[in-house]
Image (cartoon, rainbow, N blue to C red):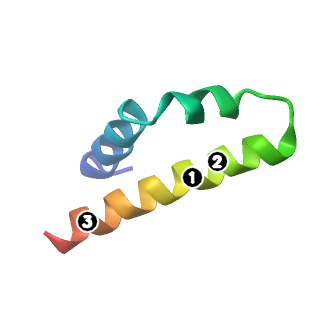
Amino acid sequence: MPDDLQAIIIAVLARAPQWIRQDLVLPEPGIRVRAEETLAAMIEQAIRDSAAR
């Protein structure tokens, strides 16, 4: 993984809201999937923003 891509992902994880962090470890699949999808969207947007610069 290129260093810049890794840095982008780490930055997104560092600023992820607490509810996402909590929901990722819940056993309920629906709640966990919502958190995974939200986090994936945040990472995708950060990558797109970086590419637009």
Residue placed under numbered mark 2 in the picture:
36
How far is disc 1 from disc 3 in space, using C-alphas?
16 Å
On screen, residue 52 versus residue 38, left or right, reads: left
Is tag 1's residue or tag 3's residue first in the polypeptide sequence? 1
Is tag 2's residue or tag 3's residue first in the polypeptide sequence? 2
**Dot 1: what SS?**
helix
Front residue of 9/20: it is 20
The amino acid pointed to by label 2 is Glu
Front residue of 52/2: it is 52
In the rendered structure, are the residues bearing label 2 and label 1 in contact, judged by CB atoms less than 8 Å apart? yes
Residue placed under numbered mark 3 in the picture:
49
For label 2, the crowd category at 10 Å Cα-Cα, with few meaning under 14, some 14 to 19 and many 20 or more, is some
Residue at 46 percent across and 34 percent down: it is 17
How far is disc 2 from disc 1 in space, using C-alphas?
5 Å
Residue placed under numbered mark 1 in the picture:
38
Q: Position of residue 8 (x, y in %)?
A: 30, 47
Residue at 26 percent across and 65 percent down: it is 49
- In this rendering, the label closer to the viewer, 1 or 3: 1
